């Protein structure tokens, strides 16, 4: 049914990000001056509304007030907020993300991203506003969410239209590096049964990295590249219409649009060596890497109340078009520049039945279908190669890959829980079938395959009388297989009948065993949690980039299976309502991971057994404190602090080598005054101006020295975390 709750802030509310699931409920928990208790946090991680503290698995949630006050507008801040979540921003639509060490950077995608229960296959790194909460589900989510959720899921839940009142908000933020960010939303009741909600934003940012030299040292050609290499512009919005068609039948329809023009994976050329990195804030390239992306999405949700059963249908369509220009060699030489236009269309359909009421038996069951189509053309520009009659400012453009990919997914799933006395038993099962067809159009190679997986889940929960519970959950997830890109001129691959085909990679699988405890103490003023997990991770997928065997200078990128690994870890969380005005939370995550013995690289060049796989942060800690008390008139004084520490991480790819990313600590601070209508805030991100990389990896040295041997043939590249940034914002509500 259509929502009818107001989103105004309580004048004495104290909000805190509290770490959830194994780390306590990571949400905005409001405390009144009368009770100073932590409020219940309701999430839909199991596709029904329930108290986060009652779920026998690790779930974190960030509520609307925290998303707004902490200016969470992208993935990097989410990653810093939750231990054992390694998440950073890529602008090509595919985030760098692992949860508990499951998943990998690059083209592999072991964590699913969702907006209102629709998976974001093509623009997971887009900005989404007017958010009610962000949920992070840790561990394999195979039963309810299917493949591509082997590590977990990140869910955005948007605010629903309300028939209660006309209300809205406008927020203006400005600050260093030429940042101007304007966003607003409005809720319009159309009748006592229908309402409309709209959100829009626009942002300009000059960025923090510079490209001082765009003059080619070879040809003396000025490419007129702007110095602000990380400058970006974004805009977008969403319109939602919701209403009751009858007493038992309701619908919600929405459309969204997002436009991005900015950098694409801006790697800095690191001249130091671990642990003494130099962290240069300049590029020295002939071309500024750019990415232009437009996304349109539509969603229709139908709900039918059948008495003791609710039926839900969710239909979605997403269309994304993008152009990416990358200066691969990272030098002033016009040497390796790639241009990749890409189009993606995705359609999904889910039919779901679920129980209603408060009985001991609760269940959800349904079917799901998805169709994904992608077309990508890649051109490599050799600007430094001068051929008679060719203008050196034009270069030599070599098409090296034209790819078409069609993927489909069909699944049936069910999950049931039964409560008897102090015990609850949960059983889940999903049958997931993936089909994929890929064609390398330029060379006439094609291939198809299908994978069928049975994904079970089992949970046992023991509830205690002191508002606490213990649980054991076993779950399985998988990431589908696919095909490796092959460039023009590469040696052909032949199938069993002699036909030209593509090299494939197999699905990866993970089984997680989690033993946990959650509880409320001190008359509801303290919430604590702990979890121990073990993950058996088989046939792991990793990205690779290698030279074309034909020797024509082009590159082949794709995905390969490396081997098996094991991850063991712990997570601890504590939230304390210290007073009517202060909340404090702390959370810690630890992962110990290693490759199984005799894990041999596909080319046989090395045995990885006993080594730590890439993209695993051993230690991660988050501490938050939120303070709010009456100041003057209708205004409260607000102060928020978040301190995040990430330990060392091995960055890179197994086949390309790894390098250690040093540990770092980031502190964000917000202070200001708020009332029911106004919010005036000063924001200082990365207050210590910590220099750090969100990811690093070895990379070929394409400078002349590297090619001739007078310099190392390999360098380190890294993607910068944001340096210190000061901004101020003003919000008005009506």
Image (cartoon, rainbow, N blue to C red):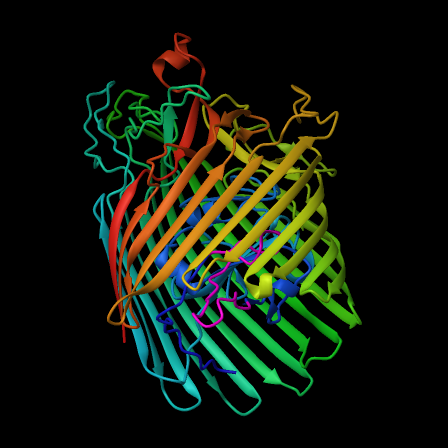
Residue drawn 66% across the image and 87% down it: 306
Rendering coords of residue 290 (x, y %) = 32, 41
Would residue 379 appear left or right of 474 to someone viewing this image? left
Q: Where is 95 relative to 239, above or below?
A: above
Q: Nearer the viewer, residue 286 or 343?
A: 286
Pick the quarter of the image with the C terminus.
Answer: bottom left
The percent coordinates of residue 227 (x first, y second) are 21, 35
Question: In the picture provided, is 569 more to the left or to the right than 256?
Answer: right
* Magenta stretch, overall SS: loop
Residue at the image point whose x is 44% and y is 89% from the top: 193
222 sits left or right of 595 in the view? left
Q: Position of residue 240 (x, y in %)?
A: 41, 74
| Residue 93 seen in render | no
- Residue at the farthest right position: 420
Image quadrant assignment for residue 145: bottom right
Along the line of sight, which residue is nearer the eye, 412 or 573? 573
Q: Is residue 689 magenta?
A: no
Which residue appears at 76% of the width and 76% of the height?
Answer: 360
The residue located at (74%, 39%) in the rendering is 497
Q: Which region shows up in magenta?
A: 17-40
330 to 58, vertically: above or below? above
């Amino acid at each position: 049914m259509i929502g009818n709750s107001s989103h105004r802030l309580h004048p004495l509310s104290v909000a805190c990000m509290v770490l959830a699931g194994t780390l306590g409920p990571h949400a905005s928990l409001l405390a009144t001056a009368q009770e100073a208790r932590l409020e219940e946090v309701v999430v839909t991680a199991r596709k029904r509304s329930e108290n986060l503290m009652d779920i026998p698995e690790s779930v974190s949630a960030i509520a609307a007030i925290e998303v707004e006050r902490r200016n969470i507008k992208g993935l990097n801040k989410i990653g810093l907020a939750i231990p054992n979540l390694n998440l950073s921003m890529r602008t090509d639509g595919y985030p760098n993300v692992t949860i508990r060490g499951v998943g990998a950077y690059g083209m592999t995608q072991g964590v699913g991203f969702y907006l209102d229960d629709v998976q974001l296959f093509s623009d997971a790194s887009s900005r989404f506003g007017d958010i009610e909460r962000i949920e992070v589900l840790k561990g394999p989510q195979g039963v309810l969410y299917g493949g591509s959720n082997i590590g977990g899921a990140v869910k955005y839940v948007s605010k629903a239209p309300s028939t209660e009142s006309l209300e809205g908000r406008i927020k203006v933020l400005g600050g260093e590096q030429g940042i101007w960010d304007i966003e607003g939303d409005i809720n319009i009741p159309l009748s006592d049964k229908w309402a409309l909600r709209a959100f829009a934003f626009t942002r300009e940012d000059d960025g923090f990295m510079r490209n001082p030299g765009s003059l080619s040292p070879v040809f003396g050609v000025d490419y007129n590249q702007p110095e602000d290499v990380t400058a970006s512009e974004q805009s977008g919005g969403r319109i939602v219409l919701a209403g009751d068609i009858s007493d038992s039948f309701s619908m919600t329809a929405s459309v969204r649009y997002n436009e991005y023009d900015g950098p694409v994976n801006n790697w800095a050329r690191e001249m130091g060596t671990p642990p003494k990195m130099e962290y240069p804030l300049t590029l020295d390239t002939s071309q500024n890497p750019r990415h232009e992306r437009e996304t349109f999405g539509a969603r229709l949700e139908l709900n039918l109340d059948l008495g003791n059963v609710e039926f839900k249908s969710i239909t979605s369509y997403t269309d994304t078009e993008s152009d990416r220009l990358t200066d691969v060699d990272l030098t002033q030489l016009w040497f390796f520049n790639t241009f990749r236009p890409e189009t993606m269309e995705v359609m999904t359909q889910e039919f779901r039945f679920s129980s209603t009421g408060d009985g001991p038996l609760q269940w959800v069951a349904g079917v799901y279908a998805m169709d994904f189509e992608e077309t990508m053309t890649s051109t490599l520009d050799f600007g430094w190669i001068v051929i008679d009659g060719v203008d050196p400012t034009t270069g030599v453009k070599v098409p090296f890959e034209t790819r078409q990919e069609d993927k489909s997914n069909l699944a049936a799933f069910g999950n049931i829980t039964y409560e008897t006395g102090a015990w609850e038993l949960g059983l889940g099962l999903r049958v997931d079938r993936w089909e994929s067809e890929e064609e390398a159009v330029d060379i006439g190679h094609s291939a198809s395959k299908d994978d069928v997986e049975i994904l079970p889940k089992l949970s046992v929960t023991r509830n205690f009388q002191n508002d606490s519970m213990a649980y054991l959950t076993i779950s399985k997830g998988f990431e589908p297989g696919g095909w490796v890109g092959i460039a023009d001129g590469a040696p052909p691959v032949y199938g069993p009948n002699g036909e030209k085909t593509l090299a494939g990679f197999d699905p990866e699988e993970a089984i997680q065993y989690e033993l946990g405890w959650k509880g409320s103490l001190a008359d509801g003023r303290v919430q604590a949690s702990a979890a121990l997990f073990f993950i058996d991770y088989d046939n792991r997928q990793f990205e690779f980039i290698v030279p074309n065997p034909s020797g024509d200078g082009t590159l082949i990128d794709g995905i390969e299976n490396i081997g098996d690994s094991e991850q063991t870890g712990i997570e601890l969380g504590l939230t304390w309502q210290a007073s009517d005005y202060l909340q404090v939370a702390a959370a810690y995550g630890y992962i110990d991971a290693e490759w199984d013995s005799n894990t041999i690289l596909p080319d046989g060049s090395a045995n990885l057994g006993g080594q730590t796989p890439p993209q695993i942060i051993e230690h991660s800690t988050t501490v938050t404190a939120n303070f709010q008390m009456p100041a003057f008139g209708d205004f409260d004084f607000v102060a928020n602090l978040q301190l995040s520490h990430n330990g060392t991480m091995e960055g890179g790819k197994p086949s390309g080598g790894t390098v250690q990313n040093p540990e770092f600590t980031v502190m964000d601070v917000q202070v200001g005054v708020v009332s029911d209508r106004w919010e005036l805030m000063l924001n200082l991100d990365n207050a210590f101006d910590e220099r750090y990389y969100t990811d690093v990896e070895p990379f070929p040295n394409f400078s002349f020295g590297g090619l001739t041997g007078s310099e190392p043939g390999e360098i380190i590249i890294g993607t910068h975390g944001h340096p210190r940034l000061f901004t101020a914002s003003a919000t008005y509500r009506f």
